[in-house]
Amino acid sequence: MTTTTNVGTRPVPATTTTRTAPPLDSSGRAAWGFLAPFGLFYVLFILGPLAYQFVSSFFATSLVRPGIGPVLGLGNYVEVLTSSVFWISVRNTLVFTVLTAVPLVLLGLILAILVNRVSRAQWLFRLAFFAPYVLPSATMALIWYFLYSPELGLIDSLLSALGVGPAAVLGNPLTVLPAIALSTIWWTLGFNFVLYLAGLQEIPRDLYEAASLDGASTWEQIRYITVPLLARTTTLVLVLQIINSLKVFDQIFIMTGGAGGPDNASIPVLMYVYNTSFTDYRVGAASAASMVFFLLILGVSAVWLTLTRRNQGQVNR
Amino acid sequence: MAVRPGTMSRRRLLELGGAALGVGAVGLTAGCGSSVAAGVVGAPPSPGTTTFWNLWGGSDGRRAESMYDAYRAANGGPASLEAITFAWGNPYYTKLSLATIGGRPPDIAVAHASRLPTLVRAGILEEITPADLAAANLTQDSFSPTAWKAVTVDDTVRAFPFDVGPLVLYYNTDICGKAGLLGPDGKLAPIQGVEAFEKAMAAGKQAGAKYGAVWPVGGDPASNWRWFQTLHAQKNSAPFLSDNGHSVTLDDDEVAKTLELMSKWTGPQGYAPGSVDYAGSLSVFGSGDAAFLVVGVWEITTMQEVGVPFGMTTFPQLFDKPGVWADSHVLALPAQPGRSAESRARTLGFARFMLDEGLTWAGGGSLPALRSVQESEGFRNLKPQADYAPSGDIAVYDPTAWFAGAGSNFQIAVGSQIALVQQGLATPRDAVASMRSQLTRYAETPDPL
């Protein structure tokens, strides 16, 4: 990321990165000392379980039986890879990611640009858009559960008034994911909005002044100054958003009563793993599912990383 | 709201934070008996407290509260009982299992009879020994045969039967009166056979109700299963699962026929709405928009509170034999290493107390498991409970498998398909095929027990 600050000051080949890490000498030991408390917990609660997960994915490990259980070899992986529910959960997770990440990035940007142009009572808009983000997931899920409830809820009443209800929005396989995505957008929009607003306030005013002197319209200013200069914020927002969406669990668990239904139409991967491991007691199979999902994400990230690296190279040149 | 620099100095902030921490610490140490403190320092809640986990929400929960209060009043005050309610179904059993495996189970917990075999095989529950029964002053003859059978796993007693909760037929007495469906005693005249049931629903609609009947469809697989199972168990057809869940034996044709019928009622014939969820079905019946409601006995309090004129009866026999879906709540002792004799005695005392309060519980709809309560004057005078008490004798429990029971994967897999058919989103044939493939998957999966 340091490369971008060097643009224009030094001719840097796009492929090399100018990382200026201090050499590791005796002061490194002090650093390790400072890291140790965190490192201990990291090993204990992240690396340790990860290793256990990897090992148990080859065994029929049961939650309610001592030890790691009988060897299954690749049996758990075969089960996961041939399980229709697992692939449905992968599909649901990806659909949910697209349904949330795209509007969240676009809406966050649009609202930030609009609010940034408001001169009075800007705090009110900032507060209004950010407020839902501080709600715990359970609160947000219950609010929307009531809104969606058929024959009773506000949204269902609206749909009925429009002549498309009564509709069990959360009980219909076609609408359950978009409905939960909509509630998630309302809930987390504020975070992206704030990041974009901060990004906007970093853009020097004189760029806009110069542009308007040159006769650029408002739209042209947004198109050629705001959006390109927010590219780094967009990357950050997009990455955080995709990670969050892939980790979705709480709101779906609560809004579907822990079932991920109807007919698995909203079950995300993490819920598949949770159900397999803790409800079905089948830790081994759940470990294998986690590993497969981990590899899928790793693959996607690798492709994405190479693509963005190449793009950044072009920007820097 | 931006925090302006200077409005609060760093020192002031630290002081405030320190004070908050201090208060928190005092709270923790002062409230030694609180579960928070117990959780933080890893100590058991104060001796003398019985911890009780349950999954009773709604009106069940409110009724249970009054029973807890009675127990506390009789046993040394608020600290004598800590009752905790969790979300119903899989989430509850997941918590109970994890807490027990983690060595920090409650003293006593509610479970469904349909879940008992799985919990027992997983080593989650202790046995109720003859000595325990004797200590609680109970014998096999203290309980109804249906309830006793439900708590016996592999010839050992694994819990105290608490109640029997069948699916029943609620009817709106005003609408049914107008429709001429009531007998001279003001109760629903007997209905037998599919045709008679359809006629009754049609009559209710003609009498001015928005719907002939209502039952939960969307978003609640368990309710769908109960309703389906009540109809299906009345047929002489094969069970869904056999051999402890290792083989799938459902009769595809018969299941499809039952589904076809149900979807006709919510679809073309329009006797019942095809999109309501659980709460919605209660609200439709509660606001007098339907002649009949098909849910479990436990919604009696809800209906009494909304003040709709209603009666309840055993679900009529529509097919070859009588039968209704039912499950039982049981009181079980989660495996607790090093449970002291004193704690065990106190816990058994609590179980006995709850059983003796059976009449209070029966007020919420369920049939008491304790014979002395069942045969008491009080229960016989309890209306409409006494009208559907025969349901207990024709109760059909869920199949046995590690993935079956109340709110289980079995109910979710099968119930979801039933819901889709009733919503007109799947054909009966496709639904049966999906049920079969999902159940086969579970049946073939290595049994984690």
Image (cartoon, coloured by chain):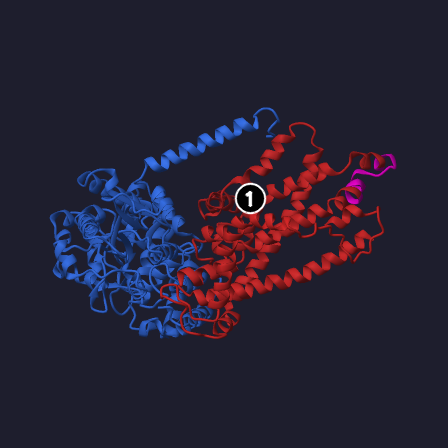
Chain colours: A red, B blue
**Stretch in magenta:** A211-224
The secondary structure making up most of the magenta span is: helix
Quadrant assignment, res A221: top right
> Could you tell whether A30 is left or right of B81 in the image?
right
Q: Position of residue B247 (x, y in %)?
A: 36, 75
> Could you tell whether B290 is left or right of B147 in the image?
right
The reply to whether the magenta stretch includes residue A222 is yes
Q: Position of residue A185 (x, y in %)?
A: 58, 46
The reply to whether the magenta stretch includes residue B92 is no
Can residue B238 be spotted in the picture? no
Name the one closer to the observer, A169 or A113: A113
Can residue B334 be spotted in the picture? yes
Q: Which residue is mark 1?
A: A187
| Residue located at (75% from left, 45% from top) | A227
| SS for dot 1 | helix
Q: Position of residue A7 (x, y in %)?
A: 81, 48
| Residue located at (78% from left, 55% from top) | A313
- At label 1, which amino acid type do we have? Trp
**Vertical placement of residue A43 versus A81, above or below:** above
Quadrant assignment, res B11: top right
| Residue closest to the far front | A26
